[in-house]
Amino acid sequence: MTKRALVAGAGGFIGHHLVSYLVSKGYWVRGVDMKMPEYEASKADEFEVLDLRRLDNCLMATRQVDEVYHLAADMGGIGYINFHHADAAGNNVLISTHLLESSRINSVQRFFFASSACVYPQGLQSGADVTPLREEDAYPYDPDEGYGWEKLFTEKLCQYYAVDHGLETRVARFHNVYGPLGTYDGGREKAPAAICRKVALAQDGGEIEIWGDGEQTRSFMHINDCVDGVWRLVKSDQRGPLNLGTSRLITINALVDLVSEIAGKKLVKRHNMEGPQGVRGRNSDNTRVNAALSWEPLVSLEDGLSASYRWIENELIKEGRLTAAVAG
């Protein structure tokens, strides 16, 4: 019998890719979001434009499905979430509580929640040479303001719905997902997309702005590895939160160098110390996810960034912001 799934947030970057992945696995998929996917048509069998902050819309969205994949969120890169705590936390709490309750009412079998590495205490991420974060390190609490607190609250709410109502919930803490078909401009983009855009628009030998001194560190997971990990988690018996990321730590300066090399450009870094920077270092400990799911990221940062850069470069050419001659 064909599995029926709802992907909430199917108009966004990860949700759009997840729809395609589930369809390839033989699912019937309903996509729901406040907007349609921006860069290509959705492969969803059915797509509904709904505001999931409303309970009535969540009840419509979760009707007659076996699994719910909750990726709907008011979010963005560090330049957005650092300055919109009330909007991000308030909107996301409404979406999450209404999706969980409507899933209970509509007898959904499994509920997946996309959490974030932002739930981890800021005190554990104060150095660039950060110790990889284990799932149990989330406690005692000190997550990122706004967005991080909402993610942590919804993790607990998933736990409560599992205990009180028997809803099978699964939680993944994403660590910096990147890849094609994601936002690359406008303030909500993540670091890899922003850097790809800046490098593409820069003249060879020109400047590129970096927020902070560039020595802050992160690990980055390609979207293909992400959606595969999500699917494996939902099929598993793992009930506690799991990290989903890579354990390869890289500085932002080195990330810029890598993208510049892909582009065939030599650029001068200009460090803007007034720009938002987030925590000093963040890395994923994958010990538990490797053991629970036999999952390991397969896409190298070099290969993933190369594909992402070429896609963003082509989009900028389509927009008329970049000529093919400059792009090379």
Image (cartoon, rainbow, N blue to C red):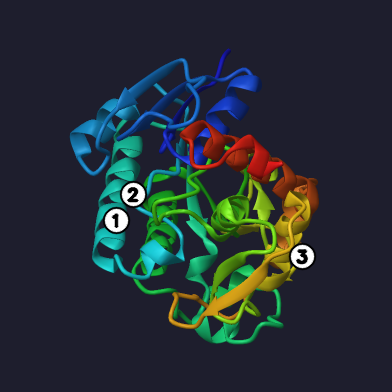
**Near-viewer residue (233 or 253):** 253
Q: Report which residue position mark 3 lands on.
A: 248
Q: Nearer the viewer, mark 2 or mark 3?
A: 3
Kindly identify the amino acid type of the residue bearing the numbered disc 2.
Answer: Ser
Asked if residue 139 is positioned above or below residue 52 in the image, the reply reads below
Q: Residues within 10 Å of mark 3 (few under 14, many from 20)?
A: some
Q: Report which residue position mark 1 lands on.
A: 93
Q: Is residue 178 visible?
A: yes
Name the spot of residue 9 as percent of width and height, x first.
41, 38
Q: Quadrant of residue 145?
A: bottom left
Name the spot of residue 95 as percent of width and height, x first.
30, 47
Kindly identify the amino acid type of the residue bearing the numbered disc 3.
Answer: Arg
Q: Quadrant of the N terminus?
A: top right
How far is disc 2 from disc 3 in space, using C-alphas?
31 Å
Mark 1 and mark 2 in contact (Cβ < 8 Å)?
yes
Q: Residues within 10 Å of mark 2 (few under 14, many from 20)?
A: many
Asked if residue 312 is positioned above or below residue 176 in the image, the reply reads above
In the image, taking residue 91 as reference, residue 322 lies left or right, namely right
Q: Which residue is at 26% across, 53% downward? A: 91
Kindly identify the amino acid type of the residue bearing the numbered disc 1.
Answer: Val
Asked if residue 76 is positioned above or below residue 71 in the image, the reply reads below
